[in-house]
Image (cartoon, rainbow, N blue to C red):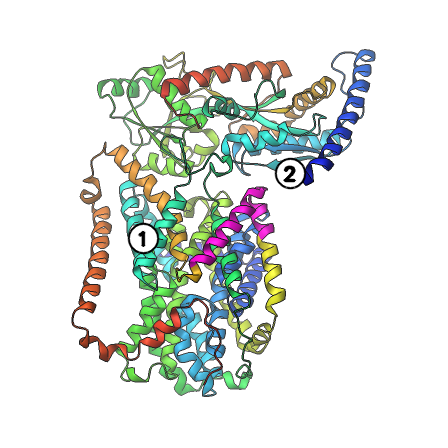
Amino acid sequence: MDGERASPKFVRISWRRARAAAIAGAAAFLAVTLSAGALTAAGYPQKPVRVFVPYGPGGVGDLTMRLLADQLSQELKQQFVIENRPGAGGIVAMTEVLHAPPDGYTLGEMGNGQSISVSLFSHLPYNLLKNFTQISVAASFEMLLAVPDKAPYRTLKDIVDAARKHPGKLNLGAINPGSTQNLSAHLFQEVTGADYTIIPYRTTPDLVTALLRGDVDLGFDFYAALKPVIAPGKVRIIATSGEERDPLLKDVPTAKESGFPNYVVTSWNGVGAPAGTPPAIVNFLSAAINRALAAPDIQEKSRALGIDARGSSPQAMHERMAQDIAKWRDVIEKAHIPKE
Amino acid sequence: MIHTAITDLLYGFTVALEPHNLMWCFVGVLVGNMVGVLPGMGPLATISILLPLTFGMKAVPAILMLAGILYGGQYGGAICSILLNLPCHPPHAVTCLDGFPMTKQGRGGVALGVTVIASFIGASWGITEMIFLSPLLVKAALQFGPAEVCSLMLLGLLAGSTLARGSPLKGVAMTLIGLFLGSVGTDLETGSERFTFGMTELDDGIELIALALGLFGIAEFMSSVNQVAPINTRYTHVRLRDMRPSLADLKKAFFPMWRGTIVGSLCSLIPGTGPTIASFVAYAAEKKVSKTPEKFGTGMLEGVVCPEAATHSSIQGDFIPTMSLGIPGDAVMALLLGALMIQGIVPGPQLISQHPDIFWGLVASFWIGNIILVILNVPLIGIWCKMLAIPYRFLYPSAMFFVCIGVYAANNDFFQVGEVAVLGLVGYVLLRLGFHPAPVVLGFVLGPRFEENFRRAMLISRGDFSVFVTRPISAVFVGMCVILVGTQIYVRLRAKGPAKNDTGHTDASPPITQQMAPQRIPVTPAE
């Protein structure tokens, strides 16, 4: 099967490569003639652009990309088509992007989740920083630390004190191992230096049910996930994990303010492309994404989901990714999570 | 409480009567009814084939359509059982026992007519039960912690495997295979891989759709090829005039109808007891109650309406544990549960409050769908019979084609098409060896939930096993498990002992066992 498909694919790739080279050449010429940060890259995009998303439809990761793709389609007058390839820590989606021609017509969503899987999988078929070109961050969202409505804890300190007094008695709840939520719970254990029991749940509704029942003393999840139970006051948010207070929860202090300056978790998603994508196209897309994210419609919808939609330069995304890979490697090693 | 239920139901009708939703409900019952008439194609295969179509749909129309296929299929299944002695879906196997003899006596039309009425009454009762019991069940649902769910899953697994038809040993074996298949993938607790053999595609486990399509769809197709005899159409000419039951018939059918309905609704409240068990229990009970038990099997109207009413009331009632607890009653329900989860909706205690449109829309659509089915079935029996004439050589290749498209569409991944092919082959082998694949799906769906909740209960109790018996709800389920296993052992031991005692009882039973043993009964031109 492989042999049969290899030759036409090869032809297609080389043809695309040739064209990409031509585009790159033209773009380089334009980049010289026009000022830096020019918003045109030799007529790119001329055909629909595919965006591989490593999550199934409906989640936060998928929704942010759909919002962005929609806006980009309108602004650049070309369809940005979302293709969901969920599963296996994002490897499936990333591999699709890896093997695509680096011509700017195949993009992939990558962020915190992929930075984690670098340390979670023993043999990834790619190097996240070297085999991909980072384009722009798209969305950031922080973790909420929730306690059941009836729980006596009012501040993060209360809960940590209780855990220090009764080591191993308190339950932390988060979804599956390897998720940002789960590692946030591990990081919390590490930063606060107390002993908890971490209970994994398969889905967010499972975790929410556990919080409502009081099976879990402290739950970790994103705003969008907890929204339905925050509103009727069934769970109480005692801290957020960002650098600054969440604009939707202005009364809730950050973990930093609560006396845990090392507990900062901000999950994020961005857009990347296969390595070798012409810099002109990368810069063009980065600028376009930054502009699209500033659109009032996107800002409004994102805020309702507790997402901070904000772009970045390609370098900033690259650095953020490198930092997060190091950060989660540390957490995973200390938590003794086995490699897959 | 009754007032809120009625307000909610009226809201449900506004959802279900939205033209778009109404259309999909109609499509569902029509497709279900059509396919139900075809021998060898039950609602499970149909739902698994049509499942991928719903990915692009909104959740409400998707679930209305899939549910419509399920109960629509039951109406269709009865037609073939009565007219042709072909149980298209397992619950109708019992209907054949008295339905086909009635057809041979020229009273097939009457049987069909009364069956439609019985089905409607059974279904209506099931729906009523769903409306008034669901809020109570949901209030109780938060009482279900890891220990309770774990014990309930154990009960479901035991009930599902030991009560399934055929040899209990085979049922248990199939359940165990299901449990094994369910354990493939990344372990929730530690994040390590189990039975993936280094294939990253298996990290998230075997796809439920692939399993259902493979074990049922593909395996069914493979075993029917060249096996289904040309259908005997001698008895298929039924005119509207023949379908009109007399007042005496209706009188005779009235009480059996209600008895069947009640048996069915009780069965539906116990997880793991699907409509097949309900219809068998109803038939057996009716025979016990009857003044003329010896006439059963010779064309008794009671023997047709009672199991049919039980099947329908059980099918509707089965939605209660599925929707409000997230516990599927049988493989079809498991598939519907999967369909909801694919839509991003997790059935459970949160469902009614978070997605009232789905829950109440579905309930209201049941009534609408059942009325549509009565309207469809009464005058269109003649046309249903014509559908049987579709040659298998056209039907099967196209169905396989849809299966492939369907699984590929699930994740845009060819790996899953391979999964279906492999599982289909496994399913065919199992079917040929007389193993029913339903418990595999049961084990596959319930197993991971059992394991997950068991480990969670252990984590929360810090390894104290007594939580399963000190918590009252859990203790009840554990007790039921013990009783279930105990009675099985008792019955076995007793059957081996005084064998003579059973002879008076078994003279009427062999037809049941003989007809039930093969999955599809090849048409033997009757006498």
- In this rendering, the label closer to the viewer, 1 or 2: 2
Q: Is residue B325 visible?
A: no
Residue tagged 2: A2
| Magenta segment includes A110 | no
Which chain letter matches label 1? B
Image position, residue B79 (x, y; %): 49, 74
Q: Residue at x 31, y 43 (%)?
A: B142
Disc 2 residue type?
Asp
Q: Which residue extends farthest front? A: A3
- The quarter of the rendered structure image containing the C terminus of chain B is bottom left
Disc 1 residue type?
Gly
Q: Residue at x 48, y 61 (%)?
A: B70
Q: What predominant SS class does the magenta segment belong to?
A: helix
Alpha carbon separation for disc pair 1 and 2: 45 Å
Which residue range is magenta in the image? B404-430
Image position, residue A133 (x, y; %): 64, 20
